[in-house]
Image (cartoon, grey):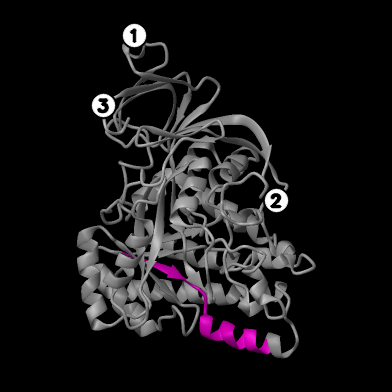
């Protein structure tokens, strides 16, 4: 279909975007949305098409945009278990049609080398469209100049780490220089905000005291050290005059720092992830090393934090829900940390689960339907320069469309998911609603549980600068 100008009509569904809900039919020509018309109207009835999709009793929503994934990420002596092929296929099953993954600069290497390496991993492999952020591990004068070039080429966001000394860590001086550069070139700085220097002291002390179980991963990565780093990142961004996007916010205290900054009218944005909304330190404390399945950074928090995260999602103090999908198998990978929690690879699988979990949040009364689409599709597309090509259903937009059955009840399980990992973080959880038919640029890639896509269908997306700034 993508090679031609074949037409598809999706009839009878409730179209839900961040802006509106309308009973409308959708006309697709080739890879793009051509028109919307009220269901049953003369205009809609006149449409002739090679393909018709019946969306009766379903929602018709934009494909999800997951702006935080790590396919094939090297970490802690191993690599994330999903390849770009398996990870993007799983994303498609979950109704996500665009990912923004992270290319990694190695210390002593250029940004270009890291970007080229990630292009080589992804090219010809992806089931859905993809783009890259750039992880900066070594901020030098040459690297600062490279930032300008990458922004021009459509890599318009740069991630820095206040955590992981000796791996990804940048000190405040390097962070400030990168922020000053992004203030000038229009790039967006993304921040992993945890005080890694202090955390390493607490890790060392915990292990010395014989505290080796997975639950101590959460105990040493203290909420206050997330809040402190978030505060510091915000102040550095203010000094630089740069916008700031804080990734995977998990603690109420960090949310409060973001809320204060936003109350001042600053271009400061926060993201959270489903694991912080649906899981907690109770999971980290599961016996027989099962807690290792839930080791990620920032860590899972006590359940009491969840109310603050949901509230912030409603008030827009948190603007995006991404997954930080970074899966490691329990057998042979998470097990590297038996006897030493600090050696458990950090990361959870989730790229397939996000759209359904957030729809469950709609049913549970945490979010409205439109806010679900705003958090999962529209705002990530706008934040990272992909809107309106992605994140909405409108004439001219890519035909990344999900026919979502809001009544389909199922149980999440590793036995049935498509991610290349041997456990589910949501094993046994019942949810209502899931993607029935998934189109990527007009091509059906998933239909009623069958994969119809192919590796290499997904196209690389150069991005504009952020379209979400105040």
Residue labelled with disc 2 = 427
Q: Nearer the viewer, mark 2 or mark 1?
A: 2
Q: Nearer the viewer, mark 1 or mark 3?
A: 3
Relative to 336, say whether 390 is above or below. above
Measured in 3D between alpha carbons, the distance from the residue under mark 2 to the one under mark 1, in whole angstroms, is: 47 Å
Residue 190 horizontal/vertical position (percent): 39, 66
Q: Earlier in the sequence, mark 2 or mark 1?
A: 1
Residue 449 horizontal/vertical position (percent): 56, 34
Q: Earlier in the sequence, mark 2 or mark 3?
A: 3
Residue that protrudes farthest toward the right in the picture: 287
> Are the residues tagged 2 and 3 within 8 Å (C-beta)?
no
Q: Residues within 10 Å of mark 2 (few under 14, many from 20)?
A: few
**Between 111 and 371, the one nearer to me in the picture:** 111
Q: In which image quadrant can residue 262 be found?
A: bottom left
**Between 275 and 177, the one nearer to me in the picture:** 275
- How many tags in the picture? 3
Residue 194 shown in magenta:
yes
> Judging from the image, what secondary structure is the residue with disc 2 in?
loop
Q: Which mark is residue 5?
A: 3
> Judging from the image, what secondary structure is the residue with disc 3 in?
loop
Q: Which mark is residue 360?
A: none
Segment tinted magenta in the rendering: 188-205
Residue at x-position 49% and y-position 22%: 55
């Amino acid at each position: 279909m993508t090679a031609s100008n074949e037409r598809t009509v999706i009839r009878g569904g409730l179209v839900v975007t961040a802006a509106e809900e309308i009973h409308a039919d959708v006309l697709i020509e080739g890879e793009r949305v051509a028109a919307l018309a009220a269901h049953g109207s003369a205009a809609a009835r006149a449409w002739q098409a090679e393909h018709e999709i019946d969306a009766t009793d379903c929602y018709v929503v934009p494909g999800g945009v997951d702006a935080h994934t790590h396919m094939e990420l090297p970490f802690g002596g191993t690599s994330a278990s999903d390849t770009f092929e398996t990870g993007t296929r799983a994303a498609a099953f979950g109704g996500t049609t665009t990912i923004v993954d992270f290319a990694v600069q190695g210390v002593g290497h250029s940004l270009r080398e890291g970007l080229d390496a990630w292009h080589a991993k992804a090219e010809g492999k992806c089931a859905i469209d993809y783009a890259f952020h750039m992880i900066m591990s070594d901020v030098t004068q040459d690297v600062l100049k490279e930032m300008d070039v990458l922004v021009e080429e459509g890599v318009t966001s740069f991630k820095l780490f206040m955590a992981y000394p000796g791996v990804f860590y940048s000190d405040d001086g390097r962070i400030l220089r990168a922020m000053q550069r992004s203030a000038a070139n229009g790039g967006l700085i993304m921040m992993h905000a945890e005080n890694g220097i202090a955390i390493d002291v607490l890790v060392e002390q915990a292990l010395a005291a014989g505290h080796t179980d997975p639950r101590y991963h959460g105990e040493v990565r203290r909420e206050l050290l997330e809040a402190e780093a978030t505060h510091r990142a915000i102040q550095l961004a203010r000094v630089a005059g740069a916008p700031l996007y804080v990734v995977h916010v998990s603690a109420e205290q960090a949310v409060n720092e973001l809320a204060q900054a936003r109350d001042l009218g600053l271009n400061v944005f926060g993201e959270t992830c489903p694991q912080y909304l649906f899981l907690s330190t109770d999971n980290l404390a599961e016996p027989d090393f099962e807690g290792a399945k839930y080791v990620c950074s920032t860590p899972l928090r006590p359940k009491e934090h969840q109310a603050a995260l949901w509230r912030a999602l409603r008030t827009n103090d948190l603007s995006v829900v991404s997954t930080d999908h970074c899966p490691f198998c329990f057998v042979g990978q998470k097990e590297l940390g038996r006897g030493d929690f600090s050696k458990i690879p950090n990361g959870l699988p989730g790229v397939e689960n996000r759209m359904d979990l957030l729809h469950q949040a709609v049913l549970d009364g945490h979010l409205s339907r439109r806010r679900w689409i705003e958090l999962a599709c529209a705002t990530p597309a706008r934040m990272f320069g992909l809107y309106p090509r992605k994140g909405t259903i409108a004439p001219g937009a890519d035909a990344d469309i999900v026919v979502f059955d809001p009544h389909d009840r199922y149980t999440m399980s590793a036995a049935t998911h498509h991610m290349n990992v041997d456990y589910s973080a949501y094993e046994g959880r019942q949810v209502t609603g899931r993607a029935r038919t998934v189109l990527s640029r007009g091509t059906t890639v998933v239909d009623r549980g069958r994969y119809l896509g192919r590796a290499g269908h997904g196209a690389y997306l150069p991005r504009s600068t952020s379209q979400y700034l105040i």
